[in-house]
Structure formats: structure tokens, C-alpha cells
Image (cartoon, rainbow, N blue to C red):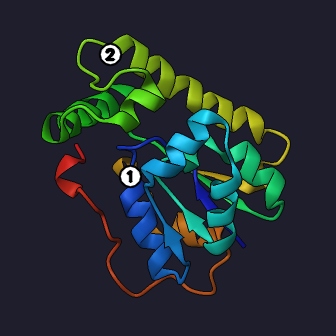
Amino acid sequence: MKVFGTGLNKTGTKTLGECLKILGFNNTSFDLKLLQDFSRGDYREIFRVSDLFDSFEDWPWPLLYREMDHRYPGSRFILTERKDPETWFDSLCRHAELTGPTEARKIVYGHEMPDGHKDHHIAFYLKHHADVLNYFKNAPEKVLVVSWDKGDGWPELCNFLKCREIPDRPFPHKNKSHIQ
């Protein structure tokens, strides 16, 4: 089974990736080259990489749920979210202050930095969330919505992925200092 994180960056994607690794999935994460390929509509390398791994999170994967569902019909999709869009935007801004302008943000959101574009970013967040849920409305068993902020963790994830048992270790919150 392949598992795709469909949540935008700063929604707990690193935590999801760590969880999937602990559960034994061969995970891959952010890849600027693949995001550039996606923006050009060139899926050759994206499909080559998706054939090699069984779990995916961060760019470009949240934008590829339709293509990945068609290519891998038995896949599962995990939509990570923050407790509310404002919390997500604040986290995105704090991260941007640390990293500075990025090509990835320019490709995805149309702006290298989120400051001054709050309404645009929140609208993007809400639309992405709605689009993912709408896409899977006739197959709700294929998608799980989780919020680490709201306390979701091993039970929700393991139940969805039909794991035989829940790992006997603490839930691996990554970037926990950013959870409010």
C-alpha cells in the first residue's frame, strides 16, 4: 500500500513522515526538483520516484493526490491540518521568517513569502482542504483527516492504515515548538 500526505506544509507533514517511517514505510519528503517538474506538467520523474517509495509527504505530494490515486488505486491519503487556518498561516509565517524567500512557496502559493498575503494563503488552505475532501467524497475510506494540534495521533493513524498494533513509543511530534 502507498500512503500520500495531502496536507500543505506546516500542517504536521514532518510528524506524519516520521510516523510512517516508524510504521515501516519507505518514506520520501520534500523535493524541489519534483515540485518544479509538477509546475511544468512533467510527471516522468515524479512517477519514477513514486514507484520507488511507499509513503510521501511535503512538496510536491499534497498537490498530486488525483494523479497518485489514479496511478495507485489501493493507496491511502492523509490530510493533515492545523486546528484552524490562522494557526497554519502563523506557522507558515514563522517558518518563512527563518528560511527567507523560497522557490517552493513561489511555485505553490504564488508568493515567495506569505507576509502581506494572508487572505490569499488562507483561501488556498481552505480550497485545498475542500478539494481533497470533495475528490474523495465517494471513497471516504481512502482519506483520513488528522490534526496533531487537536490531539490526533497513533490510534487514528494506525486504525486508518490497518496496523496490527500501535507502536509502543511516544507519538513523534516534529517541530512541536510550533504547535500552539
State the residue at coordinates (79%, 38%): 137
| The N terminus sits in image quarter | bottom right
State the residue at coordinates (36%, 35%): 103
Residue type, numbered disc 1:
Gly
| Mark 1 secondary-structure assignment | loop
* Residue 76 in picture, x, y percent from top left: 70, 60
Q: Is residue 19 left or right of residue 101?
A: right
Q: CA distance from mark 1 to mark 2?
A: 20 Å
Displayed quadrant of residue 88: top left
* Residue 51 in picture, x, y percent from top left: 69, 69
In this view, 80 is above or below 157: above
Residue situated in front as seen by the camera: 131 or 161: 131
Residue situated in front as seen by the camera: 55 or 83: 55
Residue type, numbered disc 2:
Lys
Confirm whether residue 146 shows in the render. Answer: no
In this view, 148 is above or below 167: above
Q: Is residue 55 left or right of residue 116?
A: right
Displayed quadrant of residue 30: bottom left
* Residue 116 in picture, x, y percent from top left: 25, 12
| The C terminus sits in image quarter | top left
| Residue carrying label 2 | 118
The mark that comes first in sequence, 1 or 2, is 1
State the residue at coordinates (42%, 14%): 120
| Mark 2 secondary-structure assignment | helix
* Residue 3 in picture, x, y percent from top left: 63, 64
Q: How would you rate the neighbour count of disc 1 (Cα within 10 Å): few for under 14, some for 14-19, many for 20 or more?
A: many
Confirm whether residue 70 shows in the render. Answer: yes
| Residue carrying label 1 | 12
In this view, 178 is above or below 83: below
Residue situated in front as seen by the camera: 49 or 67: 49
